[in-house]
Image (cartoon, rainbow, N blue to C red):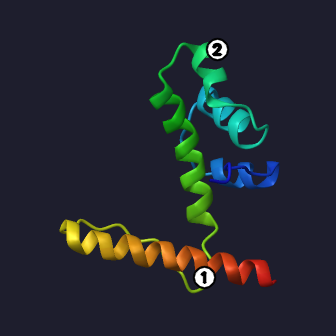
Amino acid sequence: MKKKSLTEEQFQSAIQDLEIGDQTKEIAYGVLVEGKIQAEFVLKYGLSRGAISQAVGRVWASHETKNLPDGYELVSAILPKYRAYLVKKWGDEARHEAKQRKNKL
């Protein structure tokens, strides 16, 4: 699995409208922009691995939401498991197609 990373510009765009504290920004910046490992921040701040992952995840989710390809939309739904499975499968296919289109540019 490819490590998630952002450029400085992408990071600034992702946090622009987020209401997060300085510590969350520092953690997410360190992991996503500087390529540090999350465990480093577990030790530095004495936080759980889950808390560090959540901080990074909030910024990453914001980045993904702001960078949807044209013609795509992010949706959230509560579905029975069998339908959720199908939607997740469609989502994986759509991500793959969008990635292929982007690589052709």
Question: How far is disc 1 from disc 2 in space, using C-alphas?
Answer: 39 Å
Residue type indicated by callout 1: Glu
Eyeballing the image, is 19 above or below 67?
above
For mark 2, what is the residue? Answer: 44
The location of residue 46, given as percent across then percent down, is 54, 13
Q: Quadrant of the C terminus?
A: bottom right
Q: Name the residue located 42 percent from the left edge and 78 percent from the top edge.
A: 90
Q: Which one is closest to the eye, mark 1 or mark 2?
A: 1
Q: Residues within 10 Å of mark 2 (few under 14, many from 20)?
A: few
Indicate the quadrant where residue 79 lies.
Answer: bottom left
Contact? badges 1 and 2 (CB < 8 Å): no
The location of residue 32, given as percent across then percent down, is 70, 43
The location of residue 35, given as percent across then percent down, is 76, 38
Is disc 1 placed on a helix, strand or loop?
helix
Farthest residue in the left direction? 80
77 left or right of 14 in image: left
Farthest residue in the front direction? 1
For mark 1, what is the residue? Answer: 97
Q: Residues within 10 Å of mark 1 (few under 14, many from 20)?
A: few
